[in-house]
Each structure stands twice: as structure tokens, then as C-alpha cells.
Image: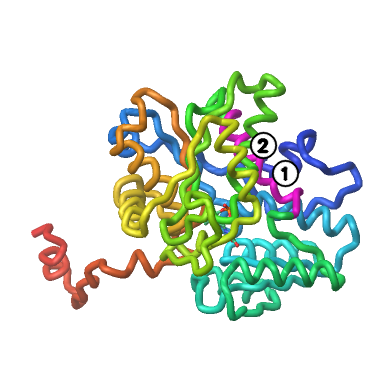
Amino acid sequence: THQWRGIIEEYRDRLPVSDTTPVVTLREGGTPLVPAQVLSERTGCEVHLKVEGANPTGSFKDRGMTMAISRAKEEGAKAVICASTGNTSASAAAYAVRAGMVSAVLVPQGKIALGKMGQALVHGAKILQVEGNFDDCLTLARSLSENYPVALVNSVNPVRIEGQKTAAFEIVDMLGDAPDIHVLPVGNAGNITAYWKGYQEYAADKIATRTPRMWGFQASGSAPIVRGEVVKDPSTIATAIRIGNPASWQYALAARDESGGAIDEVTDREILRAYRLLAAQEGVFVEPASAASVAGLLKAAEQGKVDPGQRIVCTVTGNGLKDPDWAVAGAPQPVTVPVDAATAAERLGLA
Ligand code: F0G
């Protein structure tokens, strides 16, 4: 009997680990690459979804966290800390449990989805709700890690990026080559940095014949890279990417420019439209931030910026169950019926 071993064992020779690194894993990675029929029809392209919500804690963060926590354990850390819009904290909390470490998480007060808060709580993280936004939380986390015995596991920790680059490896391994375009949501800009690194490494080693153009999408109310300036009070319903001063800003620009790509914005309305399309027409339930990639692809297609016939991968970064409020909001209330088949049949429109 075989199962996927987690990204460190599957890609050990491409990651900064040694034989003595303790591997802390929940068998993350190996996520589905799902052909997207409706998106393919709409764009005239071959569109695939890299479904990162299928990771153990429900987001792509697990790829980076297995690396960050394994290396922190190797270095003897007893405690880890992160700033988070929710997913990083959920992942850090879970992996810290596996490693026998204490986790501390700093989240913007009132601005993280309930499911993510529940994950951090149930995994026993020490949680502080900070009276500020994500950027303030990150400043605080950095300062604490510099002055106290606690290891920082945000994506400013380079081993996080190393872990996350494995998603690009999986895509090339599955498709046989890099796609023409890779689309993903951008918040703190760690993930676009990581994918670009992964694609470049595979091209350098001739495992892929080329690299894709990298297309990143920010939410309009939180689009510092698009605007070219820090957004002091970022806003968007996609709380995961509500970030005004991304830590990996310069790396995101490099990924864009070196790949011949683009970084653009999508409105909350466009995000929710893509969110509903993914669930209702592709059968893939993601959280709102994740739908920014697909919203961006649809926007670009409507603007005539997508030549037909290309192979495109959209990363959908997190599971829809983390933030179900938007699934329920605006949907019709389910009808209540007695235990009676005739009534049920009639209400279902079967009779
Ligand atoms: N999608 C989801 C679901 C996320 O949680 C994040 C980031 C992103 C996209 C953007 O990725 O920051 O690498 O550009 N979430 C971080 C967190 C900030 O704290 O969980 P990025």
C-alpha cells in the first residue's frame, strides 16, 4: 500500500533538508489538478485548477509549513510565531502540534474567517487578536521573533518559499511540461514567488522546456502592487488577501517581469462571481480569496487578453469550508417539509 509521503519526502533532493532533519509532516501536497470544463469553454483554452484546499489543513500553507516547522525543530526551537489572515495560523498551529511545539499567532481583530479561527483554537495555538491589520501583525511578529525565543514561520522565512515551490513541480510532473500561463491570487506575495522559483528550477534542470507567464491578481481594495504604493487601510471580502504592504513585493515584481506576466486587480464582485461559478459549475468549493485567480482569468478573457488554445493553470488556494458565510449569504433558505414523501417530491419538483 502506497500513499503520498508529503512534499519533503517526495521532493527531498530539491529542498534544503538533510538526512538528520526531523520531518514534521501531515502528508501535504500531492493535491488534485482538476480539468475545468466550463472555464475551458469560456476561454477557449485548456484550463486546470490546482486544488490546494485539499491539503491537510485546507490551504497551500501546509507546503511551506512542513518545511518551516521541520527546520525550526532541527534548530531546537520550542515555540513558533506567525502573523496571519487565517490560513498560515491554522497551518502553523497544526504542524506545531505534530512537532511538540508551542504556537503563537497574531491575527487582525475581527478580520479572519471563523473556520480558520476554529482551526487555530482547536490545535491549541496561543492567539492574539491585534488591533490592526495583517501588516501590523507581521511587524509585531517580526519584532517578537527578533527579541524573544520564538521562530518566525511567515513566508519571509525563506524555507516557507522552498516548500511552496513544490506545487509548481507537481504541475509540471503531471502535465509533462510547464503551462503557458499560471494564475494565482496575491496577498503577501509569497506564493507567486514560490511558484516562480519552482518553475525556474525545473526549466534550469530541463525537466520543463519553458516557464509559464505568471499572472497574479489582488483584490481591488487591497492592491498595493497594482497601484505601486502601500495601501494603508486595505479592504476586501477576501480576508485572506487583505494585505496593504506585501512582504514579498519585490519578488512578485520579479516573477511578473522575468516571466512576461502581469499583476492586476479584481473587484469583490468579480471575486464572488468566480467563487459561485467554481462551486456551481465546476464542483470546486474554494474560499473567496482563492477565487481571485479565476476571477482574474475571466476578466482577462473578457478583455481579449487570453489567446485561445493555451494551457492555463489556476491555483485555488484554500478550501471553501473555511469561510462558508459567502456560500450561505444570498442563497435561498432551504424549504422545510414534514416526513412525507409526497410533499418532499412536490417541493423538489419531482412530482
Ligand atoms: N489565498 C489564500 C487562501 C491565502 O490564505 C493567502 C494568504 C493567499 C491566497 C495569498 O498568498 O500571501 O502568498 O500572496 N494568506 C496568508 C495567511 C497571508 O496569513 O494565511 P500570498
Label 2 sits on what residue type? Lys
Mark 1 or mark 2, whichever is nearer to me: 2
Residue 159 magenta: yes
Q: Which residue is mark 1?
A: 162
Residue 29 picture quarter: top right
Dots 1, 2 in contact, CB < 8 A: yes
Crowd rating for badge 2 (residues with CA inside 10 Å; few <14, some 14–19, many 20+) = many
Percent across and percent down for residue 202 are 67, 27
Q: Quadrant of the N terminus?
A: top right
Residue 155 picture quarter: bottom right
Q: Residue at x 19, y 75 (%)?
A: 337
Mark 1 vs mark 2: which is more N-terminal? 1
Q: Main secondary structure of the magenta part?
A: helix
Percent across and percent down for residue 316 are 48, 48
Q: Residue at x 33, y 38 (%)?
A: 39
Of residue 143 and residue 39, the one placed in the foreground of this image is 143
Q: Residue at x 35, y 64 (%)?
A: 327
Name the element at disc 1.
helix
Q: Which residue is mark 2?
A: 197
Percent across and percent down for residue 290 are 46, 53
Residue range of the region highlighted in magenta in the rendering: 157-173
Crowd rating for badge 1 (residues with CA inside 10 Å; few <14, some 14–19, many 20+) = many
Q: Quadrant of ligand 1?
A: bottom right
Label 1 sits on what residue type? Glu
Q: Is residue 185 visible?
A: yes
Residue 285 magenta: no
Q: Is residue 159 left or right of residue 86?
A: right
Of residue 122 and residue 340, the one placed in the foreground of this image is 122
Residue 90 picture quarter: bottom right
Residue 48 drawn above or below residue 265: above
